[in-house]
Image (cartoon, helix red, strand yellow):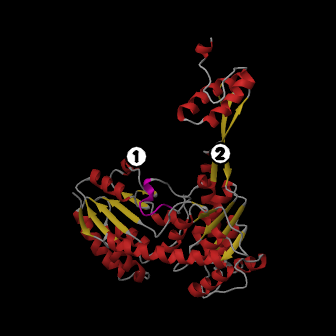
Amino acid sequence: MAEYLKRGKPADERAEDDARVRATVEGILGDIEARGDAAVRELSEKFDGYRPQTFRLTDSEIEAAMQKVSTREMADIRFAQDQIRRFAEVQKSSMTDVEVETLPGVVLGHKNIPVNSVGCYVPGGKFPMVASAHMSVITAKVAGVKRIVASAPPVNGAPHPAIVAAMKEGGADEILVLGGVQAVGAMALGTESIAPVDMLVGPGNAFVAEAKRQLFGRVGIDLFAGPTETMVIADDTVDAEMVATDLLGQAEHGYNSPACLITNSRKLAEATLAEIDRLLAILPTAETASVSWRDYGDVILCADHDEMLRVSEEMAYEHVQVMTDRDEWFLENMTNYGALFLGPRTNVANGDKVIGTNHTLPTKRAGRYTGGLWVGKFLKTHSYQRVLTDEAAVLVGEYGSRLCMLEGFVGHAEQCNVRVRRYGGVKVPYGEGAPYRDAAE
């Protein structure tokens, strides 16, 4: 049985935190729906100290912000965007429209149709998440979304230049300087100055994630992408420095970012605990990372690789770094996760910023039923049908009539019967199922 050498907050304390977040978010969304722009301005001033005349940047304001990004920084942004765009285009090519004649005269098909409008949220509170603009805006653009609204909070009372540049270069049609629940609420519900969107995407803190959850149904969402989670699955083929570095590299995101080591090596587990203490003494972001590690850090010692797999599958973490003597075995057998990072040469930061896979991923065990953000999230698969001949209309109609009557749906049956009568000349009594052909003969 797995042994915890370190365990974070118990589940009941985490549930209390979640309940407080839910209540706060419900009140904010209700205020935005009732008072529109006035509520959004007050919330922006309260949380970000920012109350502009309008939250949408003009073309000249966008250009002015981009001028503050150095040539080298812009080159880095474009390099990352090229990788993300290239992988998104490959993903889109895997999705094809289909059409097939399933019976003589019966044609069925489906079309992949882009969502018409999307709101892309880009976090920017403690850290300006430039990469989130690439991940959502570019992917939506590749999918063919007609209207892309991108929103990020102000940083030091102004638009963050690199975020604005990433949004514009990625293909955003509207750029808002607006953060938190007020941003996703305004984009989803609409206000006097912000037209509502059909779908919300992008990561965020616990409040943003909860807002998306409460708004789901009013609009579509990509997934529940809350505070980042990272898991390292490691054996004694890797050392404590690398494991500790990978855990703290994600724990620095916020005060409630879970980080977990699963290992079958007691020596590695104990060395990692010591190495984390050493690194926290020199890490500039230790103020954040140390709280996450204290409250949400786990070290789990397992008997063997099979138990490591079972524990990781149950936890279904967002980022899973695998560094073992059998990385491909984990790839073949794991089913519950956001994204896998296989081997010591890659790491979660690659996926977060540049390598090309999307970093908006499922958290809080949502990896059990969904993957991360990708082109397919922006595409709706809609089916259609055609019946080309009288014979096909009668054949399908006869079966349909009887199956409708089997369920007691007389009105449904008559939709089939009127066609059996009209195209086949079969005298079906009103409100009865079509006769079997052998009986008619």
The residue type indicated by label 1 comes to Glu
Mark 1 lies on residue: 332
Extreme residue toward the front, this view: 430
Quick check: 296 left or right of 73? left
Mark 2 lies on residue: 382
For the question of whether residue 72 can be seen, the reply is no
348 shown above or below 164: above
Residue for point 62% across, 14% down: 440
Which residue is more in the foreground, 8 or 134?
Answer: 8
Main SS of the magenta segment? loop
Q: Where is residue 142 in the image (x, y as percent from the top left)?
A: 67, 56
Q: Position of residue 147 (x, y in %)?
A: 72, 62
358 shown above or below 406: below
Q: Where is residue 300 in the image (x, y as percent from the top left)?
A: 27, 64
Residue for point 50% across, 70% down: 210
Quick check: 292 left or right of 114? left
Question: Which mark sits nearer the N-terminus, 1 or 2?
Answer: 1
Magenta stretch contains residue 365: yes
Disc 1 to disc 2, C-alpha distance: 31 Å
Image quadrant of residue 67? bottom right
Residue for point 22% across, 55% down: 303
Q: Where is residue 401 in the image (x, y as percent from the top left)?
A: 61, 29
Q: Magenta stretch?
A: 361-368
